[in-house]
Amino acid sequence: QAQLVESGGGLVQAGGSLRLSCQASGRSFSSDAMAWFRQAPGKEREFVAAINWSGSRTNYAASVEGRFTISRDSAKNTVYLRMNSLKPEDTAVYYCAADDRDYTGGNRFLYDYWGQGTQVTVSS
Protein backbone atom coordinates (compact mmCIF):
# COMPACT_ATOMS: atom_id res chain seq x y z
CA GLN A 1 0.00 0.00 0.00
CA ALA A 2 1.43 3.35 -1.06
CA GLN A 3 2.18 5.58 1.89
CA LEU A 4 3.69 9.01 2.55
CA VAL A 5 5.07 9.80 6.00
CA GLU A 6 6.16 13.31 6.98
CA SER A 7 8.67 14.17 9.67
CA GLY A 8 10.78 17.08 10.86
CA GLY A 9 8.11 19.39 12.17
CA GLY A 10 8.38 21.14 15.51
CA LEU A 11 8.48 24.42 17.37
CA VAL A 12 10.87 27.11 16.16
CA GLN A 13 11.30 30.82 16.77
CA ALA A 14 10.60 33.37 14.08
CA GLY A 15 13.59 33.68 11.78
CA GLY A 16 14.61 30.09 12.35
CA SER A 17 14.79 27.11 10.02
CA LEU A 18 13.39 23.62 9.71
CA ARG A 19 13.71 20.82 7.21
CA LEU A 20 10.74 18.60 6.59
CA SER A 21 11.07 15.14 5.08
CA CYS A 22 8.50 12.96 3.35
CA GLN A 23 9.33 9.28 3.07
CA ALA A 24 7.38 7.39 0.44
CA SER A 25 6.86 3.65 0.61
CA GLY A 26 4.74 0.92 -0.88
CA ARG A 27 5.78 1.70 -4.43
CA SER A 28 8.29 3.83 -6.28
CA PHE A 29 7.39 7.51 -6.50
CA SER A 30 10.32 8.31 -8.78
CA SER A 31 7.98 9.13 -11.69
CA ASP A 32 5.61 11.21 -9.58
CA ALA A 33 5.54 14.90 -8.93
CA MET A 34 5.77 15.59 -5.21
CA ALA A 35 4.39 18.55 -3.34
CA TRP A 36 3.94 20.18 0.03
CA PHE A 37 0.72 21.75 1.24
CA ARG A 38 -0.15 23.28 4.58
CA GLN A 39 -3.26 23.91 6.60
CA ALA A 40 -3.59 26.38 9.43
CA PRO A 41 -6.47 26.16 11.95
CA GLY A 42 -9.71 27.38 10.43
CA LYS A 43 -8.21 27.75 6.97
CA GLU A 44 -8.25 25.70 3.81
CA ARG A 45 -5.32 23.55 2.82
CA GLU A 46 -3.00 25.62 0.64
CA PHE A 47 -0.24 24.89 -1.81
CA VAL A 48 3.34 25.49 -0.69
CA ALA A 49 5.70 23.94 -3.24
CA ALA A 50 6.00 21.17 -5.81
CA ILE A 51 8.75 19.40 -7.73
CA ASN A 52 8.49 17.32 -10.88
CA TRP A 53 9.66 13.74 -11.23
CA SER A 54 13.22 14.60 -12.29
CA GLY A 55 13.73 17.58 -10.02
CA SER A 56 14.22 19.86 -13.01
CA ARG A 57 11.10 21.90 -12.37
CA THR A 58 9.82 23.45 -9.17
CA ASN A 59 6.86 25.62 -8.30
CA TYR A 60 6.35 27.75 -5.19
CA ALA A 61 3.58 29.74 -3.62
CA ALA A 62 4.34 33.44 -3.63
CA SER A 63 4.22 33.52 0.17
CA VAL A 64 7.21 31.16 0.50
CA GLU A 65 9.27 31.85 -2.62
CA GLY A 66 12.83 32.75 -1.71
CA ARG A 67 12.48 31.27 1.79
CA PHE A 68 11.54 27.64 1.15
CA THR A 69 13.27 25.08 -1.07
CA ILE A 70 11.81 21.79 -2.22
CA SER A 71 14.10 18.97 -3.28
CA ARG A 72 13.99 15.22 -3.74
CA ASP A 73 16.18 12.16 -3.53
CA SER A 74 14.53 9.59 -5.76
CA ALA A 75 16.95 6.87 -4.71
CA LYS A 76 15.64 7.28 -1.18
CA ASN A 77 12.03 7.87 -2.28
CA THR A 78 12.14 11.04 -0.19
CA VAL A 79 11.18 14.66 -0.75
CA TYR A 80 12.34 17.53 1.43
CA LEU A 81 11.20 21.04 2.26
CA ARG A 82 13.85 23.34 3.61
CA MET A 83 12.20 26.29 5.36
CA ASN A 84 14.26 29.36 6.22
CA SER A 85 13.34 32.73 7.71
CA LEU A 86 10.22 31.24 9.23
CA LYS A 87 7.38 33.53 10.23
CA PRO A 88 4.51 33.00 12.68
CA GLU A 89 2.14 32.88 9.70
CA ASP A 90 3.95 29.75 8.50
CA THR A 91 2.44 27.89 11.45
CA ALA A 92 0.37 25.00 10.11
CA VAL A 93 0.20 21.28 9.61
CA TYR A 94 2.36 20.48 6.59
CA TYR A 95 1.29 17.69 4.27
CA CYS A 96 3.22 15.81 1.61
CA ALA A 97 1.39 14.85 -1.59
CA ALA A 98 2.15 12.98 -4.81
CA ASP A 99 0.72 12.95 -8.31
CA ASP A 100 1.47 10.17 -10.78
CA ARG A 101 0.85 12.44 -13.79
CA ASP A 102 3.76 14.71 -12.84
CA TYR A 103 1.45 17.63 -12.04
CA THR A 104 3.22 20.44 -10.15
CA GLY A 105 0.38 22.93 -9.83
CA GLY A 106 -1.40 24.16 -6.76
CA ASN A 107 -4.75 22.37 -7.09
CA ARG A 108 -4.87 20.00 -4.14
CA PHE A 109 -7.71 17.98 -5.68
CA LEU A 110 -5.37 16.76 -8.42
CA TYR A 111 -2.96 15.02 -6.07
CA ASP A 112 -3.52 11.31 -5.58
CA TYR A 113 -1.61 10.47 -2.42
CA TRP A 114 -1.36 12.26 0.90
CA GLY A 115 0.53 11.89 4.13
CA GLN A 116 -0.88 12.45 7.61
CA GLY A 117 0.93 15.72 8.18
CA THR A 118 3.52 17.17 10.54
CA GLN A 119 2.96 20.20 12.78
CA VAL A 120 5.13 23.29 12.34
CA THR A 121 4.76 26.03 14.92
CA VAL A 122 6.63 29.32 14.63
CA SER A 123 6.69 31.50 17.73
CA SER A 124 7.09 35.26 17.58
Image (cartoon, helix red, strand yellow):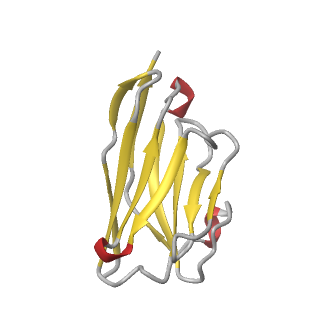
Quadrant of residue 24 within the rendered picture: bottom left
Tell me where residue 23 appears, x and y as whole percent: 31, 65
54 versus 82 height, above or below: below
Residue beneath the point at 63% across and 68% down: 104
| Image side of residue 49 versus residue 24, left or right | right
Q: Nearer the viewer, residue 123 or 83?
A: 83
Residue 26 sits above or below residue 65 on the image: below
Residue 87 vs 1, above or below: the answer is above
Position of 112 with respect to 1 (left or right) is right
Q: Where is residue 106 drawn, in percent x and y?
A: 67, 60
Name the residue at 52% across, 70% down. Answer: 55
Quadrant that contains the N terminus: bottom left
Query: How many numbered tags mark residues here?
Result: 0
Residue occupying image coordinates x 47% and y 35%: 84
Whole-percent x, y for residue 26 in the image: 29, 81
Q: Nearer the viewer, residue 24 or 74?
A: 74
